[in-house]
Amino acid sequence: MATLDLAGIRKSFGPVEVLHGVDLAVRDGEMIVIVGASGCGKSTLLRIVAGLERPSGGRVVIGGRDVTALEPAERDIAMVFQNYALYPHMTVAQNMGYGLRIRGLPRAEIARRVGEAAALLGIEALLDRRPRQLSGGQRQRVAMGRAIVREPKLFLFDEPLSNLDAKLRVQMRAEIRRLQKRLGVTSLFVTHDQVEAMTLGDRLVVMHQGHAAQVATPMEVFERPADTYVAGFIGSPAMNVLAGRLAEGGRAVALAAGPVIRFADGPRPGAEGEPLTIGIRPEHLRPDPAGLPLALELVEPLGSETVLHGRLPGGEALVVKLAGAAPREGVLPIALPPEALHVFQAGSGKRLDPAPPA
Amino acid sequence: MERKTVFEGKLLPCLLVAPQLLVTILFFFWPAGQAVWFAFLRQDAFGIRTSFVGLENFQDLFADPLYLETLRNTLVFAAGVSLIALTVALLLAVMADRQIRGAGLYRILLVWPYAIAPAVAAVLWIFLFHPQIGLLGRALNEAGLPFDYKLNGTQAMLVVILAAAWKQVSYNFIFFLAGLQSIPKSVLEAAAIDGARPAYRFWTVTFPLLSPTTFFLLVVNLVYAFFETFGVIDALTKGGPARATETLIYRAYIDGRVNLDLGMSSAQSVVLMLVVILLTAVQFRFIERRVHY
Ligand SMILES: Nc1ncnc2c1ncn2[C@@H]1O[C@H](COP(=O)(O)OP(=O)(O)O)[C@@H](O)[C@H]1O
Ligand SMILES: [Mg+2]
């Protein structure tokens, strides 16, 4: 068990820089989920922590020790791969005991620890089988077991659930979380699935094109996204974005779609007429006879809720999620509650919070 | 989906396979059958009378200490060739696998020996090992190490083993490289994270995962050493000095073509045929049962 500190991690493959300086401080026993679209550099970051890739810049510090120059073998970490990467020619027991054998533990001790881990994962009956005789879920457990028996300082997971079917994925997700809490091992978990990220992480790192766009708890990321990318990435259906300009000396936004809405939480700094991006989640919109007319284009009834796709006057698309049933077509007046607005600078996409009271 | 073309009638399909069958029968089954038949015959010294002698040729063969000597030579030769060809090829393949980007030229250079005719290859080795004109041979002699593979049997054996192995390295290399590249990278990375150093990783993960390839190549190399090295030996040592490099295949040729003892030569051919059938059978048995990782 240990802390993990990443300072200014950069990585280039040839002329292409894929990580542009990532900083992260992970507390002892914390579960950090690195989430982002495919190709944003999640795996690369994880592999740098593992020592499988050398960073082009920056430092990796595990438990206070700078391991940047060390081989994977010297870092005392364990990793669960997406394709499990079990040793095909070894039995489950040998797979799990491989790392212990390298450390020169006595045979009896290896057997005891493998047995314990197998019991924890419910795979005692599989110990004599070979990987190709196992189902996907069982392989997943063995890969977990191989990580657990070593009692490493750090667990690294690279999309370990993405090869499982939907039902098993939910089950294994809960199991990994339970196990991680129980063992208290500091963990990094990479995924592109926002539901996995929200349910698993103590904190999330939302990655975007080689940057850490936001590092925060799941609720914080959801309630106060740091920029328009994070806002659009977390939440389903995605947050609506509308164009607007700063008005009334910073106290309101004049939406391109028409109305001027006063900020519920105070005035924003900036020049009058500065372009803004306004975000609002589909579930925070509600029908209101005095609202904006939304011309419906597509209605998706999902049983307990309904998702409406439509256009505002001016042509901007808007998605609304309503509880219960809704009209199938026509025009529905929609209110934008001021307290649900997220305000971003239009150019940088950064969140624009109210100016602190002077 | 695989599509099967179906021919009407029987005549056309028969006609289409006929050339292939004809060649096989004419150049393989016919001489092979003849050899089996000759193995049970004996001719007098002038080739005038031929009589059926049953298994006598085989009895004579295995009672002949020189034949047993040849058998021993063959085993040493085959073991040497296979061991060297496999080890060197594996080493080169591991190196190529690490640096696969620059491997294009490397691979072409390595595959070359396979395309060179045995006699031409042998000339290259003569230029290398000949005690007077050979690069290495002369250097050894000048350095005070007496080297003459035309006089020293052990040295002769070493030279033919090296020459024969060199030709087989390319073939082995291709298969080893393909085998190495089919091992998932993440498995080796998992081993690295588990704490395995490169050498340990090689012996506990890479090598076991290569074992189907290795076994396949071992059989191929043995068959090569037993049956396809006539050219190398003929060009380099002609079985000498004092029969030190005479292998089964070379002796069968000498007895048949030079000594004109068709009965003995045929009996030897039959023994060789049995060996090849045995090796092939082992191969097939193994491939059927072989573990697919
Ligand atoms: N070994 C490599 N060589 C060159 N480019 C690479 C290599 N590994 C990853 N990349 C590139 O780096 C970027 C990030 O990759 P990766 O970390 O695997 O993304 P993610 O795991 O978030 O999907 C991608 O554009 C990918 O093409
Ligand atoms: Mg990835």
Image: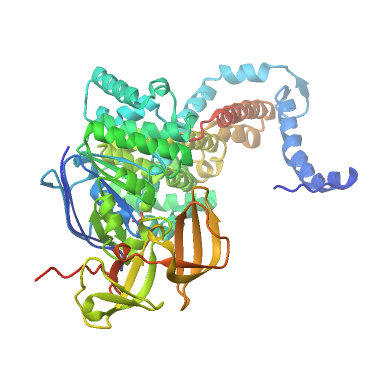
| Residue A181 x %, y % | 25, 35
Work out whether residue B266 or residue A222 is closer to the camera in this orientation and state it: A222
Q: Give x and y (percent) for residue A34.
A: 30, 51
Q: In which quarter of the image is the C terminus of chain A?
A: bottom left
Query: Looking at the rendering, which quadrant does residue A156 occupy?
Result: top left
Judge whether A110 appears above or below B192 on screen: above
Instruction: Please give the name of the residue rendered at 23% of the width and 32% of the height, measured from the top-left corner.
Output: A183
Q: In this view, does A37 lie above or below B291?
A: below
Question: Which residue is rendered at x = 43% and y = 40% of the image?
Answer: A169
x and y, in percent, of residue A259 in the image = 37, 76
Image coloring type: rainbow
Instruction: Identify the residue at the far front of this view.
Output: A289
- Above or below residue A49? Residue A117 is above
* In the foreground, B115 or B212: B212
Q: Nearer the viewer, residue B122 or A207?
A: A207
* Rendered location of residue B61, percent (x, y): 60, 21
**Location of residue A188 by image quarter:** top left
Residue under the point 17% across and 37% down: A1
Q: How many labels does the image show?
A: 0
Is residue B213 among the parts visible in the rendering?
yes
> Image height check: is A311 above or below B144?
below
Residue furthest left as drawn: A358
Relative to the observer, which residue lies in front, B20 or A5?
Answer: A5
A39 to the left or right of A188 = right
Q: Can residue A17 be seen in this view?
A: no
